[in-house]
Amino acid sequence: KQEVTQIPAALSVPEGENLVLNCSFTDSAIYNLQWFRQDPGKGLTSLLLIQSSQREQTSGRLNASLDKSSGRSTLYIAASQPGDSATYLCAVRRNKLIFGTGTLLAVQP
Amino acid sequence: GAVVSQHPSRVICKSGTSVKIECRSLDFQATTMFWYRQFPKKSLMLMATSNEGSKATYEQGVEKDKFLINHASLTLSTLTVTSAHPEDSSFYICSARRHPEAFFGQGTRLTVV
């Protein structure tokens, strides 16, 4: 059974810092991995999708990497801003999309 | 990106009544949609997979008679919470996949009083 874990569960950083969010999964037989952002009381916004054959994807200040063999992905956020404050979820897909436990990020002005 | 619209965003209902939540893919056709439930400060739990033109596939532990799913067209899936109880109060989110990416609705906050 696939299990997805995210570390840390919560993170508070001052504005401008670079930060890394971690995601690990137990079954490496995945089709892809997707990072999402969720604001309080809202749905999910897709940030980046990495196919199983890819190593990383970049969008603006965000960079996500994937090491499928070790069951790990990282989301790197450069020059963090208060508007980045949200919960970040990773999810891996084979037949279904299995979500991680989430990281609650607070960027202090 | 693709847009998935979910309605209503908030609903309050009395115990014993039924509530219908709609999920629409606005700019693409989705033969499969997914319904999730999210408890406070928890991650998303897949409830069921909605298949256009056929019966939904429910995850273990999810009561199919309580959470009725209908996927009548390629752009619309509905989740009906029947005979709602206060413990059904939760945040429900739908998703549709436009290969290879999954897109999510805005979520529905259900409160049963």
Image: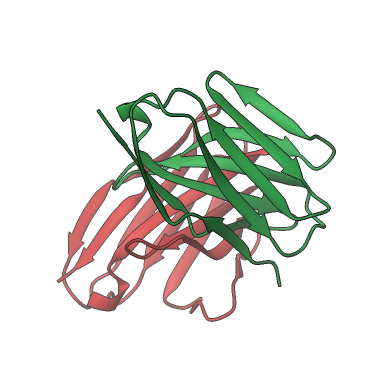
Query: Residue A102, image x and y in percent?
Result: 47, 54
| Above-or-below relation of A65 to A67 | above
Colour seen for chain A: green
- Identify the residue at horizontal 43%, vertical 59% (top origin): B79
Q: Residue at x 74, y 58 (%)?
A: A95
Quadrant in which the C terminus of chain A is drawn: top left
Task: Tally the numbered discs.
Answer: 0
Q: Quadrant of residue B85?
A: bottom left
The foreground one among B50 and A78 is A78
* Residue A87 in sight here: yes
Q: From the viewer's perspective, tell me whether residue A68 is left or right of residue A109.
A: right
Quadrant including the N terminus of chain A: bottom right
Q: Residue at x 64, y 34 (%)?
A: A64
Give chain B's shade.
Answer: red
Is residue B99 in view from this perspective?
Answer: no
Q: Position of residue B28 (x, y in %)?
A: 60, 30
Compared with residue B11, is residue B29 higher up or lower down, i.e. above or below?
above
Residue at horizontal 85%, vertical 38%?
Answer: A53
Image coordinates of residue B76 in percent, x first then y, are: 50, 44
Residue reaching furthest to the top: A60
When the figure is inspected, residue B79 is found, relative to residue A56, above or below; the finding is below
Colouring: by chain
Q: Position of residue B19 (x, y in %)?
A: 30, 62
Relative to the observer, which residue lies in front, A26 or B76? A26
